[in-house]
Every structure is written in C-alpha cells, then in structure tokens.
Amino acid sequence: MSKVFVIDTKKQPLNPVHPGYARLLLKQGKAAVYKRYPFTLILKTAVEHPRGEPLRIKIDPGSKTTGIALVNDASGEVVFAAHLEHRGAQIKKALDQRRGVRRGRRQRETRYRQPRFLNRRRRQGWLAPSLESRISNIVTWVERLRRLAPITAISQELVKFDLQTLDNPEISGIEYQQGTLQGYETREYLLEKWGRKCSYCDVSGVPLQVEHIRPRAKHGGNRISNLCLACEPCNLAKGTRDIQVFLAKKPDLLKKILAQAQKPLQDAAAVNTTRWALYERLKALGLPMECGSGGLTKFNRTMREFPKEHWIDALCVGQSTPQQLHTSSVLPLVIKAKGHGCRQKCNLDDLGFPRGKAKGAKKVKSFQTGDLVRAVVTTGTKQGVYIGRVLVRASGSFDLQTTQGRVKGISHRFCTPVHRNDGYGYGSGRTGVTPPNLPEKEGPFLPGLKARGILDRFGEE
C-alpha cells in the first residue's frame, strides 16, 4: 500500500513511513491514529530537529476525475496517489431541477418570488458552480496534503488540448510541432473525443489509427474536425473513398460520425475553462509551479510503458518527471466528492410542492449524516459488527449504509465514530504497476527496528 503520513506533536509534517513501520509505532505506543483518510499518525514524543525530504505534488486535472500524486524527485519514489472524483454533473443537474421547479410554478401563476436573473452582476472571474466545485476540490486536497507531508513544489497539467495549435501548427512555431512531441496532442484529443474506440465499428482495446474523414487524396485537410479514429481493417476498407460512399448503406452511422466530428469536446472544454483559474489559486499557495501539456504527459507515460490511469497521468506531468518511478507498492486512494448536504429546508415533489416536514437538526447525538461509524450491536435481532456511513434520525435510531447493503434501526448507543464527514467518500483503487523495462529496486530494510531508536526516521529524539 502507499506510505503512511506522520506528523509531530506540533502537527508539523514529517517523512511518510512504510506501513510496517507505522504498525510498529502504534504497537509500541509512540504514535496514535490522527486521521483515517488519508491514514495519518501523530507522534506522542516531541522531535527536536525534524527532517523532511521535499516532495512534489503532481496534478492531472480532469472534468470527471483528477489524478493526484506525491513524488520524491530525488529518488523517484511515489509516496501517495489518489483519484479525485468530482460532482460537477450532479451540481448542474440539481441547478437545472431547481430552475425547472421555479419556472414551472411561475408559469402556473403560483405565488412565488420573482425571477432575479436580470438584476444581478457576476464578479470578474466568475465560474459556473459546477466548474467552481472542481477547482475547490483540487485546492482543498492540495492544502490538506500540505498539512500532512513536506510538499515544496506543484506540477500541474495546464493545457489539456491546445486547440489553436491543433488547427494551425504555425501559431507557436512549426519547430515545436515537428519535434519529439509531434502528434501527441492530436492523438490524445482524438482518443478523448471518440471514446478510445473505432469510429466505424466501435471496437475497443485494439491499436487505433488516425483517419481522415475526407481523404487527403480528395483535398481533405489535417484540421482536427476532419480527423477520427479507425482500426486497421476499417481504415484499409475505406481507403481513399469518401465517407459518404463508404457508409452509403449506413446512413445513421454516417450522420453520427459527421455530427461527432463537428461537436466540441465537452469535457475538454470544462478543463480548458478552469485551467487558468486553478493555476492562479494554486500559485497563491506560495509554492513553485511547474506546468505541462497533455501531450507531454502522454509522452512521458508512453516512454515509461505505464498503463492509462488518472494517478499515473499525474505522475507523468511536467518536465520534472524522474526517469524511474517506483510504483509497485502504490495503492491509490479513491476520493469521491459528496458535498456537505444542502440548504433546502424540505424535500419537494415532482411539481415543486413541499413533501413532508421541515428538516431537523443537522447533528443528532453528536453524529451527522455521512459520518463513517463502527457499530457493535450487542442486543436485539441485529447483533453483529457493522461499518459504514450513518444516516441520522431525530429519534436516535440510525441507518447504516454498508458494503452489504443498508441496515436500519441501529441505536446511537452502539455507534463509534471512525471518520467524521468531511464532504468526501473514500475507497481504494488498483495497486501500482512496474513497467517491464524499468524494474523496481529492492527497498532497504526498515531502520530502527533493533539498534536504532524509533524516532531516528524523523529526527533526533
């Protein structure tokens, strides 16, 4: 698994440690659990001269999922990795639903407040709530990790797709487009746009080729709107024929491909909209910033023969990527944005009328909905041990959402908090991989188990 974060008695970050070393600290009573997600220990003994190796946090922003990784540039060791899943689509859906309810009630002349969208001014730099949520999630986790690890630099994938360069290679210099990175920006854009499958037969998991919708033999250009993806059999079958001739017997597929070719990439547009706002907010943290493009990220990943994963893309962001990255023991943390509830006073039916009574207090018996708890039920028909998210009720009889399903009627007396609700849900992803041409080096034995003191890893005792 990934390394365990450690902080001292003053809550200052120290070097992350191996899980086995963390278990030893807990067993000998020299540390206590400070946080479950990400797992963090706090030392019980003061460290006079704490030491911390500088780490770099690398970010691969995405519309739906953002990859995060902590890397030691000197050794190439990956300390921590995570997938941060955003809730931008959920926010947009909630706003659309609220807008529809309000407009419906106004149209029916139901007594309701007047529309206010005509008498408001948006501040400079305003972003839609769904986009603002993506930025806030990333900045929140960068600040959280700064409190748990000695982070000294930030790397961000700033430009996902340089659309102007794709349409006009000479806009930033033809030498750049014809260098080592030639084609990586275009291919990555096409893979995202066409869903990483053949445009003609929908096959996936096979090598795909860049296909000209209007063949170059018939004066078709290299503009991005004239390119798609095709497997080798479909590419050979089409040849230099025009797409109208090739798909004459498949008018529905022809219409779909032509529409998709002219359709902008929605997810890429969301990333392009927020990239500079995210850059400015990360820059305001006061750490050195490094930026890289999506083409460079794919180039680094391809040269190291890594698979396609969000956290692996984060590892490959920027020119500072070490030649060897040790990823075999990394287990990425899956972080899913859940929100902190809503300010809606009561639930509504399909027509926008109140359903049920007004909501009660947010906290009941020191618990609130979303807390991760461990319930040890000793009496009744539901005896056993349950771990899951709690749904509080004013009566003190809670519901638990576990991996096996929902358990109803658990008294608050049996519940013990494991992790308080912080607006995010947690899980684990696939373990890391080792590329065949870059073998992992065997790590050293854990120091301090026999001759040295436990705190030698962090500083002088």
Image (cartoon, helix red, strand yellow):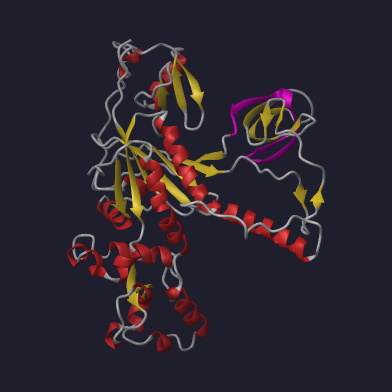
Above or below, 11 against 443 in this view is: above
Tell whether position 401 is magenta.
yes
- Give whichever of 429, 383 is nearer the camera: 429
Name which quarter of the figure residue 44 lies in. Answer: top left
The residue stretch that appears in magenta: 399-421
Q: How many marks?
A: 0
How far across and down, in percent of the image, does residue 443 sit? 28, 30
- Give whichever of 119, 444 is nearer the camera: 119
Q: Is residue 36 left or right of residue 406?
A: left
- Give whichever of 13, 6 is nearer the camera: 13
What quarter of the picture does the N terminus occupy?
top left
Name which quarter of the figure residue 322 lies in. Answer: top left
How far across and down, in percent of the image, does residue 371 sit? 63, 33
Q: Is residue 337 visible?
A: yes
How far across and down, in percent of the image, does residue 86 sit? 51, 49
Tell whether position 378 is magenta.
no
Q: Is residue 196 visible?
A: no
Name which quarter of the figure residue 180 lies in. Answer: bottom left
How far across and down, in percent of the image, does residue 61 sit? 41, 50
Query: Mainly helix, strand or loop, the magenta region?
Result: strand
